[in-house]
Image (cartoon, helix red, strand yellow):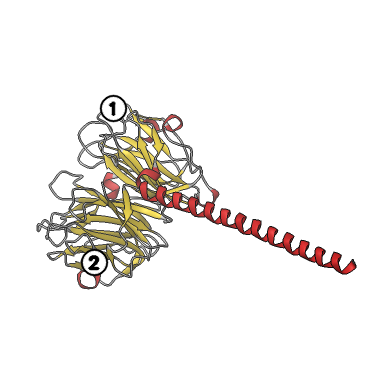
């Protein structure tokens, strides 16, 4: 009897063991099937929600595009009908990328650019010597060595070391014919006094800062030119590390500071300024992209509306999303082709480094990043727009800091 009980007990235990094992296998199979189904759904959602811009991983033919691109410009430098790109590189050799005619950009800096290495921050381009091609100006910050590249055609440049008479801790350069003599002049934004240089009609510049600009001790990070007061000449806005400023042109490139009458007093730390007519009323409005490096300032970006005469009122609260992250790059661009300017921002430390704010048609902006960009981790200081593959759509080159530059192709 005892033996029979032992046999029955062992058989029962074995049967119970196999039942538990069978149920466990069924349960694990169910979990695996569920996970597979969820994964399949996720992949389908990702593939069916294709963004309007996507990274072309084969379009940049260079190993040197991860060395702090601070600014860029697009232009057909070699005259083949395709847009090329030039880059200002921080503490590296500046770069020229030539379009190969297939939408890829090939680094030809070794053959086309001087071998100088400086702390380049920004670029201006124009036919400064009036020989029919486009020349380049690079301004530098820490090593205070500005560069002037003359185009010897087609797209081969040589250094013109005596062409610029000033040095400074420079962050930005813009070009326009300020004195209306038919030749492009320069304005350079610095730590301290900004410079205004007049072209002597031979492509050499004379410093006329004292004659044309008010005294200013601000640290200027960006400058944007535009007719703010509607009188037909170019004024400019300074993006500063303290109070931003408006300089009004009162005749042939002579400027006065009219910040007090025209701009609210806010001591933000501003990295970039953009001008654009966000409400389509025929005048230029202002966007300030802010940071708080060193814990100074408020990183909330700001939007100001022009009354048509160059007096600006802040409309940030009702027009922009709140942000507590730093914006280091910004551009107005009608990305959805609806006739209203949208905003593209390059941000830092918020997990969403690229942001697209769509103008709703009433100067209010809504975050619709996921419709336009894939998830990109990058630190973008500048956006360069161009139809690099000549398909009629505007592509976008991202000038990235501490990371690889990217070329985004528009697919619709």
Q: Residue at x 12, y 64 (%)?
A: 154
In x, y percent, where is residue 331?
33, 45
Residue 74 in view of the camera: yes
Q: Nearer the viewer, mark 2 or mark 1?
A: 2
- In the picture, the disc for residue 46 is none
Q: Are the residues flagged by discs 2 and 1 in contact, CB closer than 8 Å?
A: no
Q: Residue furthest left?
A: 131
Q: Residue at x 11, y 56 (%)?
A: 130
Q: Residue at x 64, y 59 (%)?
A: 22
Residue to which mark 2 is pinned: 106
In x, y percent, where is residue 363?
35, 31
In the rendered image of this protein, does residue 332 appear above or below residue 395?
A: above
Residue 238 figure quarter: top left
In the rendered image of this protein, does residue 47 appear above or below residue 68?
A: above
Question: Is 188 on the left or on the right of 33, as rendered?
Answer: left
Q: Secondary structure at mark 1?
A: loop
Nearer to us in this view, 149 or 106: 106
Nearer to us in this view, 61 or 312: 61
Q: Secondary structure at mark 2?
A: strand
Q: Residue at x 69, y 58 (%)?
A: 19
Label 2: few (<14), some or many (≥20) within 10 Å? some
Residue 151 figure quarter: bottom left
In 3D space, how far apart are the residues under numbered discs 2 and 1 (Cα atoms)? 45 Å
Residue 85 figure quarter: bottom left
In x, y percent, where is residue 378?
41, 56
Nearer to us in this view, 406 or 171: 406
- In the picture, the disc for residue 308 is 1
In x, y percent, where is residue 27?
61, 54
Labels 2 and 1: the sequence-earlier one: 2
């Amino acid at each position: 009897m005892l033996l029979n009980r032992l046999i029955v007990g062992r058989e029962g235990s074995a049967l119970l063991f196999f039942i538990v094992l069978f149920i466990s296998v069924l349960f694990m199979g169910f979990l695996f099937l569920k996970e597979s189904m969820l994964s399949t759904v996720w992949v389908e959602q990702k593939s069916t929600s294709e963004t309007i811009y996507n990274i072309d991983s084969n379009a940049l033919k260079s190993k040197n595009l991860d060395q702090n691109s601070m600014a860029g410009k697009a232009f057909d430098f070699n005259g083949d009908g395709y847009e090329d790109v030039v880059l200002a590189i921080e503490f590296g050799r500046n770069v020229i990328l030539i379009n190969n005619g297939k939408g890829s950009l090939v680094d030809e800096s070794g053959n086309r650019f001087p071998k100088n290495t400086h702390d380049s921050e920004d670029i201006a381009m124009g036919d400064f010597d009036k020989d029919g091609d486009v020349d380049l100006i690079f301004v530098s910050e820490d090593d205070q060595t500005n560069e002037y590249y003359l185009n010897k055609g087609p797209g081969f440049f040589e250094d013109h070391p005596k062409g610029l008479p000033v040095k400074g801790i420079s962050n930005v350069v813009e070009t326009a014919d300020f004195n209306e003599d038919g030749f492009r002049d320069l304005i350079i934004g610095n730590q301290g006094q900004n410079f205004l240089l007049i072209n002597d009609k031979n492509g050499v510049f004379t410093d006329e800062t004292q004659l044309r600009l008010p005294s200013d001790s601000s640290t200027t990070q960006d400058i944007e030119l535009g007719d703010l007061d509607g009188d037909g000449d170019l004024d400019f806005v300074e993006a500063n590390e303290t109070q931003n400023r408006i300089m009004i042109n009162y005749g042939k490139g002579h400027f006065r500071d009219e910040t007090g009458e025209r701009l609210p007093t806010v001591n933000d730390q501003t990295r970039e300024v953009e001008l654009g007519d966000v409400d389509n009323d025929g005048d230029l409005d202002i966007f300030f992209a802010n940071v708080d490096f060193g814990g100074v300032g408020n990183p909330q970006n700001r939007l100001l509306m022009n009354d048509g005469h160059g007096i600006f009122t802040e409309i940030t609260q009702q027009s922009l999303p709140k942000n507590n992250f730093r914006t280091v790059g910004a551009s107005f661009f009608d990305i959805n082709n609806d006739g209203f300017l949208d905003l593209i921002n390059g941000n830092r430390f918020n997990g969403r480094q690229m942001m697209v704010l769509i103008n709703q048609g009433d100067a209010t902006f809504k975050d619709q990043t996921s419709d336009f960009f894939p998830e990109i981790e990058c630190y973008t200081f500048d956006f360069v727009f161009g139809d690099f593959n000549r398909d009629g759509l505007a592509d976008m080159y991202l000038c990235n800091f501490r990371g690889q530059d990217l070329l985004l192709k528009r697919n619709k």
